[in-house]
Amino acid sequence: MKPITWIPLMWGVICGAVSSGGFVWRWENVLIAAACMLMSGPLLAGYTQTLNEFYDREVDAINEPYRPIPSGAIPLPKVIAQIWVLLIAGILVAYGLDRWAGHEFPILTALAIGGSLVSYVYSAPPLKLKQNNGWLSSYALGASYIALPWWAGHALFGTLNWTIVTLTLIYSLAGLGIAIVNDFKSVEGDRQLGLQSLPVMFGVTAAAWICVLMIDIFQAGIAAYLITIRENLYASILLLLVIPQITFQDMYFLRDPLKNDVKYQASAQPFLVLGMLVVALALGHAGI
């Protein structure tokens, strides 16, 4: 289930709650927000990761044969059972959150089901986005990590609107850059099995540049938007956070993306994550 991957989704829920302007610090809201993070992280991200591991077992047998499924440590029937348990539990929690919020339309349940379908299309044949379209698969992953949990947190404590939807989808183009990083470790297996990840399509060096430019350009674009709504302080903070990010991109990732992908993510991604919260604070302050 890769617990490290839960953190961005749980953080996205926090950003959505902040941008809604409706979160008030009291125990009930804290517990409800925690339930939403449970839904987004351990349950549905866990479902996504387990599903992806199941359908990537042939690739992993080449790249990382020690992983639980290709090594045989976990039998396939247990993997399938885990997928179903996580999926159903995630949707049930989403429905409970809709009931708590008094939604006439069960928007959180719809987001949970919609995100789960995106996960299935990303990982499973016959569509398997990664196999057929590296751009679309990376964007689907980026949007799942930024936009979807943000929408859930915002809808839970406020009213989700098209401005928030549009901005987070644009922000997810920065997430596309983060998604590309995950493809470098499996480039050899992807190439052998004909999977069209961006490192396979464009080569390692070009894909590394695409990765960092997507992250930096779209963060700067969001900062420009904050200036247009007169949230200049938050825009300045966001731009300042991009500076160390660029530094680590040059120090680690652009010099050797295959060797330094994990080191780069550990050093640079915290600044992207903090930038998301800065944007959420700005949107909440502006009443978007």
Image: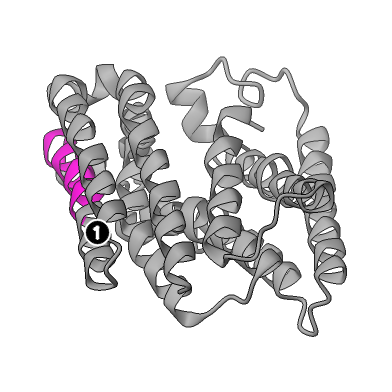
The quadrant of the image that shows the N terminus is top right
Segment colored magenta:
203-217
Say what secondary structure mark 1 lies in: helix
Q: Is residue 241 above or below residue 268?
A: below
The quadrant of the image that shows the C terminus is bottom left
Q: Is residue 23 above or below residue 253?
A: below
Q: Is residue 156 magenta?
A: no
Q: Residue at (70%, 20%) from the top-left corner?
A: 72
Location of residue 106 in the rendering, given as x and y in whole percent from the top left corner:
77, 76
Look at the magenta stretch and give its main secondary structure. helix
Q: Residue at (80%, 70%) from the top-left corner?
A: 101
Q: Residue at (45%, 48%) from the top-left corner?
A: 277
Q: In the image, 164: left or right of 156?
A: left
From the image, tell me which residue sits under label 1. 232
**Crowding near the residue tagged with mark 1, few <14, some 14–19, many ≥20 C-alpha atoms within 10 Å:** some
Please tell me which residue lies in front, 171 or 55.
171
Location of residue 274 in the rendering, given as x and y in whole percent from the top left corner:
40, 40
Q: Residue at (63%, 47%) from the top-left corner?
A: 48
